[in-house]
Image (cartoon, helix red, strand yellow):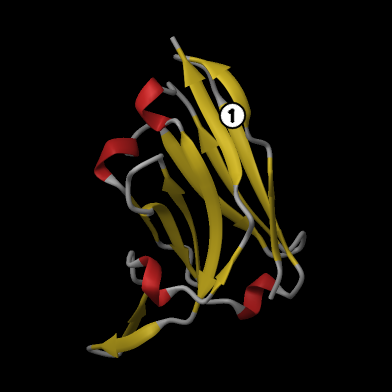
């Protein structure tokens, strides 16, 4: 699976950006997809995850400001970011991976970067005040 991100760039604090990630394969066959970010000197962290049933999980720091979505017809993943803050400055990565073992019959998606096996090259988002 190849993943290619786009849509990053500089943006003023309070502004919005929409990141896109185009996959080389049918995204309906990928159970877990997500956006991660990595700021200089920090570890890569999960920002938003979406599973094959449409359930979403967000980092506390972006809840209410970011929205993840997936369009299987376009084989694409999106991240709509609003009310951006300088603290959101980072390189943003698209990732995909398998569902985690079912718990009580329900598959789920991890927020751990080590559980994702395909990554894009990243797109830089810089929020200036």
Q: 68 and 121: which one is in front? A: 121
Quadrant of the image containing the N terminus: bottom right
Q: Is residue 121 left or right of residue 86?
A: right
User: Where in the figure is residue 71, as x and y percent of width and height?
Assistant: 67, 58
Does 126 sit above or below residue 115?
above
Q: Is residue 69 left or right of residue 20?
A: left
Q: Find residue 84 and report its image quarter.
A: top left
Q: 125 and 60: which one is in front? A: 125
Which residue occupies the extreme top position in the image? 129
User: Where in the figure is residue 11, as x and y percent of width and height?
Assistant: 57, 19
Q: Is residue 45 left or right of residue 122?
A: left
Q: Find residue 110 and report its image quarter.
A: bottom left
Q: 51 and 100: which one is in front? A: 100
Q: Residue at (39%, 66%) from the top-left corner?
A: 113
Quadrant of the image containing the C terminus: top left
Mark 1 sits on what residue?
A: 17
Does 73 sit above or below residue 28?
above
User: Where in the figure is residue 58, as x and y percent of width and height?
Assistant: 34, 49
């Amino acid at each position: 699976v190849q993943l290619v991100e786009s849509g990053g760039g500089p943006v003023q604090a309070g502004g919005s950006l929409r990141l896109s990630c185009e996959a080389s394969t049918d995204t309906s066959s990928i159970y877990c997809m997500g956006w991660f970010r990595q700021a200089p000197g920090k570890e890569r962290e999960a920002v938003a995850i979406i599973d094959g049933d449409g359930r979403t999980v967000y980092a506390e720091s972006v809840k209410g400001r970011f929205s993840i979505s997936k369009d299987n017809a376009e084989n694409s993943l999106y991240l709509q970011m609003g009310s951006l803050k300088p603290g959101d400055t980072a390189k943003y990565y698209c990732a995909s991976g398998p569902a985690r073992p079912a718990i009580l019959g329900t598959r789920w998606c991890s927020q751990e970067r080590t559980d994702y096996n395909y990554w894009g090259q990243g797109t830089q988002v810089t929020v200036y005040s």
